Image: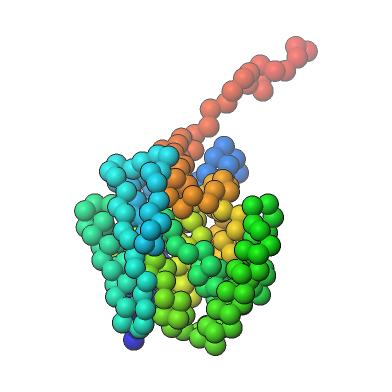
Amino acid sequence: MNVLVDLGADVEWPDNDASDQVRAALSGDTRLGSLGPLVEWAAAVQAACPPRPFTRTRVVRLFDPGSRPGNPATSGDTDPRDVECPPAVGTEATAEAIRAGARLADDEIDRGADLLVLATRGEPTAAAVLVAVLTNTEPVKVLPRGAGISPERWVADAIAVRDGRRRLFPLRAEPFEVLVGLGAGTLATATGVLMRAAARRTPVLVDGLAAAAAALVGFEVQPRSARWWRLADLSGHPAHELAATALGQRPVLPLGTSLDDATAGLLAAAVVQAATVVFPECLRPTTMVGPSPVERQEPS
């Protein structure tokens, strides 16, 4: 078996019973609004209802050489763990990049992380090719248009995605081979982080297009792994939206950012944390506000 299949073999479903208990508790109660599904997710990945607040959120940021992201607008309990990922050329280099990602996840979880934020700043064209191949989408539909993109740049990107998709589409049923063909170390390492975290029953908030593309690889290898992940945000990049649709997910926050520096992931983590804190209020009996029905009756 290849390294991705090995990682996927250890992935189990989150606890559906716990999420069902949350859903039942919120039945007819609209006070939490869109926080409700986040409480369901937290309960499922923790196998507990009510879910507890996460105690240690850790940020892992992967980037190509020369593209190190700046500091996020908010921070976790310690500084982000920044890892430069060189190109992964060939089968063994790709496998080692995936294993390196798995080791990163293991190290953070062994140090006590119970929620990870994964931000990946990679070459967007490689991520677009990956999404185009795995979702069987035409190149022009995975590329952004509009202000800020020159016609020359768009044509060059379209040609690169078209050629990459044509070359790798015959390998669509073998996601590992697609990663080998791309040679993108960030995508391979991000896939390793995500798959190992799922196998270790540790939830991940996925920040950015490249991280979402890596999540799509993991989903293709082991569909239940995606239940351990939530997209923090959607950038507005068509490939990002296609990946979200294929994963069956909506973002925690509709910010439309494309910083890929963990800002969206950390903001999403704060929202998830808030959802776990306020949910117990919904388990208490509701208290009537205002006069009772008897008090409202008119004198006869």
For residue 204, say whether it is visible. Answer: no
Q: Position of residue 105 (x, y in %)?
A: 29, 61
Q: Quadrant of the N terminus?
A: bottom left
Residue located 45% across and 42% down the image:
267
Asked whether 216 or 10 is in front, the reply is 216
Name the image colouring: rainbow
Residue located 51% across and 60% down the image:
209
Q: Quadrant of residue 299?
A: top right
For residue 236, say whether it is visible. Answer: yes
Question: Vertically, is 272 above or below 213?
Answer: above
Q: Position of residue 146 (x, y in %)?
A: 69, 55
Q: Quadrant of the C terminus?
A: top right
Asked whether 107 or 158 is in front, the reply is 158
Q: Position of residue 294 (x, y in %)?
A: 66, 20
Residue located 53% across and 27% down the image:
287
Q: Quadrant of residue 32?
A: top right
Asked whether 66 or 192 is in front, the reply is 66
Residue located 46% across and 76% down the image:
182
Residue at the extreme left of the image, as rendered: 111
Question: Vertically, is 293 above or below 105?
Answer: above
Side (left or right) of 136 relative to 259:
right
Q: Position of residue 18 (x, y in %)?
A: 42, 55
